[in-house]
Amino acid sequence: MAHELEVPGERPVSPAVKSKNMLNEAAILLAEDDENDIFLMGRAFDRAGIPNPLFVVRNGQEAVDYLAGTGDYAQRDKYPLPGLMLLDLKMPWMDGFDVLKWLRTHPQFDLLPVVVLTSSKLQSDVDKSRQLGVYDYRVKPHGFDDLVRLLDDVRKCWLDERFNRYCTSQAAPAEGPTGPG
């Protein structure tokens, strides 16, 4: 993905701006099995002007493999740790609840904002998600413009440097001469 490089002759960038740029570059991981929803999400990201790279996994097991950096996702330069995860609940092999359970047993992801983005309005799903530590629970809207607004709102809520300690703590070391890879 795109990395910010210092170009000779360019004006130095303040740390606050660098931090903001890092948040714009923070990967967003979408765990979604429905191809139509994946297509619409991609279009909605574009329409909302969200600059963050979007990575898609199609089931819960792929989400765990991506986060763990195993299998096809072992190359962190190609598959960076996300600064935000959008998680569907109803997926094959491992559902969203299983992914949330896995996340909570791996403390390195305690500060990763996970937003459930699902069609389920069931209170029991909301309650179970909250018990498993989800940051936010959003029901997928029916209209495209509503989806664009929802994604813009989610990004502002969870990738804003004032609120997202996970992204900020990941961005800070990268400013040094040998930031993490």
Image: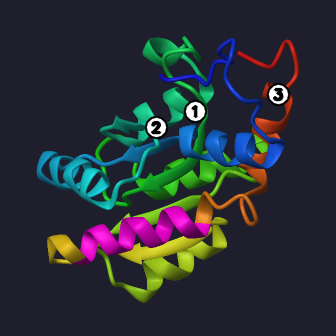
Camera-nearest label, 1 or 3: 3
Q: Is disc 1 in contact with disc 3, using a CB cutoff of under 8 Å? A: no
Can you give x and y, in whole percent of width and height, for residue 20 in the image? 67, 49
Residue designated by label 3? 175
Label 3 packing within 10 angstroms: few (<14), some (14-19), many (20+): some
Counting residues from the start of the chain, the first of labels 3 and 2 encountered is 2
Q: Would you say the magenta stretch is mainly helix, strand or loop?
A: helix
Instruction: Identify which residue, 47 or 8, lies in the foreground.
Output: 8
Instruction: Identify which residue, 116 or 18, lies in the foreground.
Output: 18
Q: Secondary structure at mark 2?
A: helix
What residue is rendered at 64% in x and 18% in y? 5
| Identity, as a three-letter code, of the amino acid under mark 3 | Glu
| Identity, as a three-letter code, of the amino acid under mark 2 | Ala
Label 2 packing within 10 angstroms: few (<14), some (14-19), many (20+): many
Q: Using the rendered image of the protein, determine whether residue 52 is visible from the camera's viewpoint.
A: yes
Would you say residue 148 sits in the magenta stretch? yes
| Identity, as a three-letter code, of the amino acid under mark 1 | Leu
Q: Using the rendered image of the protein, determine whether residue 109 is visible from the camera's viewpoint.
A: no
Res 63 label: 2
Counting residues from the start of the chain, the first of labels 1 and 3 encountered is 1
Which contiguous range is marked in magenta?
Answer: 146-157
